[in-house]
């Protein structure tokens, strides 16, 4: 217990020393710049307008500049390459999330957490796919299926019947 208390005291001392140090060049704590709701709304507005989900856009100057692009991207006969390009541009597919300057938003973090949970659930289902809840019951299936389309094969049964009939005729005669 004393070891733990000493370790906590050392860690707390290091934390306080790093927090109170005058050099701001360290990456100890970084201030997250919050995007204003207007920036987020503009981005969503732009994406919906470019995809053709929204008919009206708030920024008229931008709307006039991107009118031709919107016509191409909202065409019903758009090919797969154009769809990929549209999604890549609108979803900022070029942005490297491992970049030092990249600070994920709260929605990005939640989305990543949800994806991780989905992956873990899939992996759990895959790993335990043979361990069914009714593992103590032996599954059995009927020998003959009542509603089968197959024609019943009774040739052996008929041969046995003919054989017995011949034996009966031979023994009585």
Image (cartoon, helix red, strand yellow):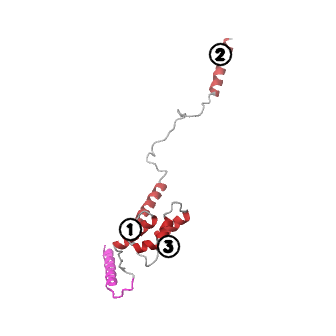
Instruction: Check residue 37 for magenta coloring.
Output: no
Query: Which of the 4 image quadrants contains residue 171?
Result: top right
Q: Main secondary structure of the magenta part?
A: helix
Which quadrant is the C terminus positioned in? top right
Numbered label attached to residue 168: 2
The residue carrying mark 1 is: 107
Q: Is residue 75 visible?
A: yes
Q: Is residue 156 left or right of residue 50?
A: right
Given residues 57 and 148, the one toward you in this image is 57
Could you tell which of marks 2 and 1 lies nearer the N-terminus?
Answer: 1
Residue 159 sits above or below residue 20 on the image: above
Tell me residue 163's x, y (percent). Answer: 66, 21
Tell me residue 135's x, y (percent). Answer: 46, 46
Q: Which residue sits at x=49%, y=69%?
A: 69
Tell me residue 38's x, y (percent). Answer: 35, 72
SS at badge 1: helix
Could you tell which of marks 3 and 2 lies nearer the N-terminus?
Answer: 3
Q: Is residue 108 left or right of residue 152?
A: left
Q: CA distance from mark 3 to mark 2?
A: 90 Å
Mark 2: give few (<14), some (14-19) or many (20+) Cα within 10 Å.
few
Question: Which segment is the magenta one?
Answer: 1-26
SS at badge 2: helix
The residue carrying mark 3 is: 94
Could you tell which of marks 1 and 3 lies nearer the N-terminus?
Answer: 3
Given residues 164 and 1, the one toward you in this image is 164
Mark 3: give few (<14), some (14-19) or many (20+) Cα within 10 Å.
few
Among all residues in the image, which is located at the extreme top?
173
Mark 1: give few (<14), some (14-19) or many (20+) Cα within 10 Å.
few
Q: Which residue sits at x=45%, y=67%?
A: 50
Q: Which residue sits at x=51%, y=60%?
A: 76
Q: CA distance from mark 2 to mark 1?
A: 88 Å
């Amino acid at each position: 217990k004393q070891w733990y208390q000493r370790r906590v005291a050392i860690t707390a001392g290091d934390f306080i020393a790093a927090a109170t140090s005058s050099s701001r060049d360290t990456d100890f704590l970084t201030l997250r710049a919050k995007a204003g709701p207007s920036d987020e709304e503009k981005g969503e507005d732009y994406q919906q307008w470019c995809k053709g989900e929204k008919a009206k856009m708030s920024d008229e100057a931008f709307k006039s500049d991107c009118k031709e692009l919107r016509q191409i991207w909202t065409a019903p006969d758009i090919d797969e390459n154009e769809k990929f390009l549209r999604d890549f541009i609108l979803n900022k597919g070029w942005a490297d999330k491992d970049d030092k300057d990249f600070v994920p938003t709260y929605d990005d973090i939640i989305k990543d957490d949800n994806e991780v949970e989905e992956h873990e659930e899939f992996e759990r289902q895959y790993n335990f796919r043979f361990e069914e809840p009714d593992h103590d019951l032996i599954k059995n299936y009927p020998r003959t299926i009542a509603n089968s389309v197959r024609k019943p094969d009774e040739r052996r049964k008929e041969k046995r019947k003919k054989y017995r009939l011949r034996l009966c005729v031979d023994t009585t005669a």
